[in-house]
Image (cartoon, rainbow, N blue to C red):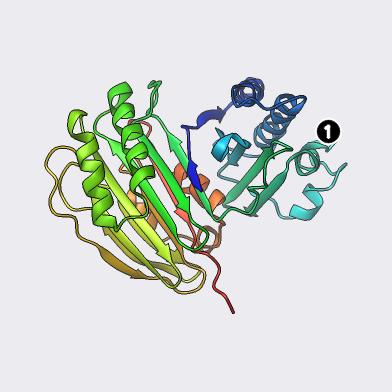
Amino acid sequence: MMLPLTAAAHVRIDHYSAVHLAAAAARSLSEQCGLPGALPDQAAVLASELASNIDKHARDGALYIQPLPLGRGVEILAADRGPGMPELERCLADGYTTVGTLGAGLGAVSRIASDFTIRTQVGVGTLACARLTRPDQPAVARQSAALVCLPADREEHCGDAGAVIDDGTIRTAVVVDGLGHGIEAAEAAQAALRSFRAASARPLPDILTALHRTLRHTRGAAVAVLRLDGERAVYCGIGNIRAVALSHEGVHHRLTGQPGVVGWRMPTPKTHAIPLPAGTTGVLHTDGIDARWTHAPSLFALRLPPQLLTASVTHNYRSTRDDATVLAVKPHPRLP
C-alpha cells in the first residue's frame, strides 16, 4: 500500500477571523477529496473548534489541513506554543470551560472525528490530530506513518513530496526535494514519486538509480529513502535530506545524504544501516526544517506519536522561505 501526501494548507490562528478561514479550508479540501454527504461540513466543524480553542486559550498556533492517503478523508493538525492544559481529561468533557462559553469545543471534536489524538504539556503547548474518514474506507486511525508537506510562503506549488509503501512487513519511505521552488520543482518531485512507486521493492541504491534516470529531463532533486524492517533500518540519500532515529530515550542517529543531485550528477549511492531498538521512530526531513530540532528534543517531543511529531517539528522548526517536509515512520510491531 502506498501512502502519498498532497501539500497541506497552513492556517495561522492569529485572530478570530482565522477560525472562519480554517473552517472554509477544511470544507473546501473535503469537497475536493469527494467526501460525501455531511462530511465536508463536519470537517469544517473540526477545524473551527480546534482553531477556536487556539484563539481562546493559546498563542502562536496554527492548523495544518491535508488529505488522508488514498482519498480516505482529511486530517486536521493543530499546534500551539502554550500554555498547555493542566487538566486534559476535563477539557475533553462537554460543558467544561475556562472562558465562560458553552464548553463544547474539544468534546465536539472527539465525538465527530473518526480518530482524535491529543497531547499537551503545561508551559510547552498542545498538539492535536483530528481525522475524518469516508465511511466506506478502511480506518487509518492508528497508522504508524505520517507526513506534513508545506510549500514556501507565497508559493502555490510545493517542490517537496513524500510517501510510504507498506507491504505488510516492511515499510519503505521516501522524501523528495525538487531543486528550487514552484511548479518545476513540484513536477520533478511528483515524477520522482511515480518512479518510486514502480521501483519501491528494489534495493535502495537501485531505487535511487531508477529515480536518477527518471529525473534526467527535470531540474533534479535531493532524495532520501529509508527502509524499516524489524530491528533495523537502511538509509540511502543524495542531497540535503536528513534522516534521524529517535526513541523515548533520545536521538540515536543523524544522517544526511551524499553530495549530488538526482537527475544530474549523482554519485554511486551508498547505504547506511541503523539499528532500531523497540519504540524507535525514523524521521526524514528536507532542509526547509531546521536540523537543530534534533539537538536537545524534550521528553514530551520524544514521546509523540508520528502524526503529532511531524506537526510539532513543522510548527516549531519550519522555514517559511523554503518548501518543508517531515515524514515520521515506525517499523511494524515485533512479534512476541
The quarter in which the C terminus is drawn is bottom right
**Image: 328 above or below 163:** below
**Is 229 positioned to the left or the right of 53 in the image?**
left
Name which residue lies at 24% across and 55% down. 205
Q: Position of residue 232 (x, y in %)?
A: 39, 70
Name the residue beneath numbered marker 1.
101
Residue closer to the observer: 205 or 14: 205
**Image: 31 above or below 253:** above
**Image: 119 above or below 79:** below
Q: Is residue 248 visible?
A: yes
Name which residue lies at 45% across and 74% down. 277
Kind of residue at badge 1: Thr
Mark 1 residue element: loop
**Image: 205 above or below 230:** above
Q: Position of residue 126 (x, y in %)?
A: 62, 48
**Is 320 positioned to the left or the right of 181 in the image?**
right
